[in-house]
Image (cartoon, rainbow, N blue to C red):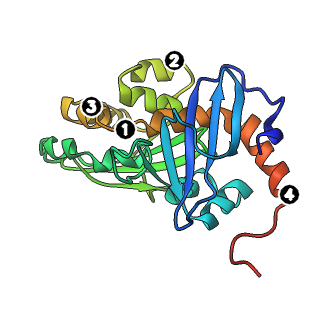
């Protein structure tokens, strides 16, 4: 698979290293993916000794992801992530990791501050990602990978921009200046700004692990580098595990 990416370049790409570990297979068909400076440096069997993230999934899910059978949202539903050094257990990848942060419990109750927000992150690790967050009386009531029925507000930006905002590297105004978009009535947008910029919500974002950054970097390589390489390889690959 490394050969399939030879010569493919992503303009302005950053650096990231991820190991893919297949559950239920000992020894598993593990893979490492390292990208740097716009190029795929390594995409081959084994594990990178200095990986930033470990992605865990079943063999069947790995096949479907690389075959392009699922979209960016569906891909993240099939994935769990962990620290390569074993310091953390499996947990949800970004953006769903936000819902696992206990800091969200500190959000104050604000009667009437109820809002459904639809996020769309383009340039995700396997394509665009739909993510919905619902606030009820000022507190997060639910998060979902997918589309909400009747959102009050829409937010569009890249997956990597989302990760940068969570880490505090950039702000919402920087995202808007760099192509991000907001959609919704003025009152709903003002409410979203107040809720998402609250100290409690920002602490929850900052507590998220590294998956947003790593997956955001890989997302910059997906369309022009990784997806074409996968298509080349999977065209000559047998069906998913267990298929007859």
Q: Tags 1 and 3 in contact by the CB under 8 Å rule?
A: no
Q: Which residue is mark 3?
A: 202
Q: Which mark is residue 53?
A: none
Q: Which residue is mark 1?
A: 209
Q: Which residue is mark 2?
A: 177
Give the percent coordinates (x, y) of residue 174: 46, 18
Badge 1 crowding class, 10 Å Cα cut-off, few under 14, some 14 to 19, many 20 or more, is many
Give the percent coordinates (x, y) of residue 185: 39, 37
User: Seen in the image, is 119 located left or right of residue 28?
Assistant: left
Q: Quadrant of residue 63?
A: bottom right
Q: Is tag 2's residue or tag 4's residue first in the polypeptide sequence?
A: 2
Q: Between marks 2 and 4, how big is the CA–CA gap?
A: 40 Å
Q: Is tag 2's residue or tag 3's residue first in the polypeptide sequence?
A: 2
Q: Name the quarter where the C terminus is drawn.
A: bottom right
Using the image, determine if residue 138 lies above or below residue 29.
above
Q: Which mark is residue 235?
A: 4
Front of the two marks 1 and 3: 1
Using the image, determine if residue 225 lies above or below residue 148.
above
Q: Closest to the observer: 39 or 29?
A: 29
User: Seen in the image, is 108 located left or right of residue 142?
Assistant: left
Residue at image location 46% in from the left, 37% down from the top: 212
The secondary structure type at the circle numbered 3 is helix
Q: Tags 2 and 3 in contact by the CB under 8 Å rule?
A: no
Whether residue 142 is visible: yes
Q: Is tag 1's residue or tag 2's residue first in the polypeptide sequence?
A: 2
Whether residue 157 is visible: no
Q: Between marks 2 and 3, how big is the CA–CA gap?
A: 21 Å
The secondary structure type at the circle numbered 1 is loop
Badge 4 crowding class, 10 Å Cα cut-off, few under 14, some 14 to 19, many 20 or more, is few
């Amino acid at each position: 698979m490394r050969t399939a990416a030879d010569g493919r370049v992503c303009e302005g790409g950053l650096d990231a290293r991820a190991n893919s570990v297949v559950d239920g297979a000992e020894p598993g068909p593990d893979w490492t993916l390292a990208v740097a400076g716009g190029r795929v440096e390594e995409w081959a069997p084994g594990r990178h000794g200095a990986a930033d993230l470990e992605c865990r999934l079943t063999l069947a899910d790995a096949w479907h992801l690389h075959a392009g059978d699922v979209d960016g949202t569906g891909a993240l539903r099939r994935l769990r992530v962990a620290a390569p050094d074993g310091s953390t257990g499996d947990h949800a990848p970004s953006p769903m990791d936000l819902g696992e942060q206990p800091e969200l419990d500190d959000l104050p109750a604000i009667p009437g501050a109820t809002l459904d927000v639809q996020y769309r992150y383009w340039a995700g690790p396997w394509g665009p990602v739909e993510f919905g967050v619902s606030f009820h009386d000022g507190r997060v009531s639910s998060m979902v990978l997918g589309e909400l029925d009747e959102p009050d507000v829409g937010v569009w930006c890249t997956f990597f921009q989302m990760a940068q905002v969570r880490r505090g590297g950039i702000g919402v105004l920087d995202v808007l200046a760099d192509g991000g978009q907001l959609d919704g009535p003025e009152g709903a947008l003002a409410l979203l700004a107040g809720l998402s910029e609250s100290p409690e919500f920002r602490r929850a974002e900052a507590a998220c692990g590294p998956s947003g950054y790593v997956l955001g970097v890989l997302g910059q390589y997906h369309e022009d580098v990784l997806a074409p390489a996968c298509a080349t390889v999977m065209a000559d690959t047998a069906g998913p595990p267990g298929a007859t």
